[in-house]
Amino acid sequence: MRNVSILVANTAMGTDKVKTYGARVCVDSMSKVAEIEGAEKEKMKEKINKIIGHGIKSFVNRQLICNFPDELFADEGILAIEQAGLVGIERLALVTNAEIVLSFDKPESVKLVLCDLIEEIIMGQACTIDLRGARYFFCLCFW
């Protein structure tokens, strides 16, 4: 990808918050379970729409991105990079002078990374994503 604006974040991108926070919900029918799942998906969709509202072409997240949010990003043509790790996003932010975003409510106050080129190189079990700009070069390596 060329001429890419990137949002660097550290946020949960899973739709199963009940499981994440260890809560227990008792219901009397499967339709209630479906209702809870639907509400969680709707919350995730709202979050993704806020992220998309930043006008980005790529999203780098410290944490895992589940299938549903990944599909929403793909539908919008946004490259989503997951599990970059805390050290990975801290280095990326340091090198590019970006901020690590935790909340997506104020797009006007977020510093995006502008990148000339993103390329993915897959060799065996490892994957390296190279981010190239006018004054910097950065690699995210995944095993």
Image (cartoon, rainbow, N blue to C red):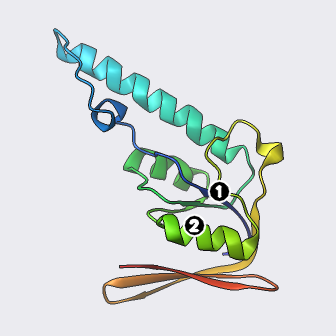
- Rendered residue at 46%/46% (across/down): 13
Judge from the rendering whether residue 75 lies leftward or rightward of residue 3; answer left or right. Answer: left
Judge from the rendering whether residue 57 lies leftward or rightward of residue 139; answer left or right. Answer: right
Tell me which amino acid carries mark 1. Answer: Ile
Residue 89, disc: 2
Q: Position of residue 134 (x, y in %)?
A: 82, 85
Q: Earlier in the sequence, mark 2 or mark 1?
A: 2
- Rendered residue at 45%/56% (across/down): 63
Rendered-image quadrant of the N terminus: bottom right
Q: Height in image: 97 above or below 69?
A: below
Tell me which amino acid carries mark 2. Answer: Ile
Judge from the rendering whether residue 66 lies leftward or rightward of residue 107; answer left or right. Answer: left
Give SS at disc 2.
Answer: helix
Residue 100, disc: 1
- Rendered residue at 61%/46% (across/down): 102
Label 2 to label 1: alpha-carbon separation: 7 Å
Q: Position of residue 4 (x, y in %)?
A: 73, 69
Q: Height in image: 75 above or below 45?
A: below
| Disc 2 + disc 1, Cβ < 8 Å | yes
Q: In the rendered image, which quarter is residue 113 located in?
A: bottom right
Work out which residue is located at the far top of the displayed protein and give it. 28
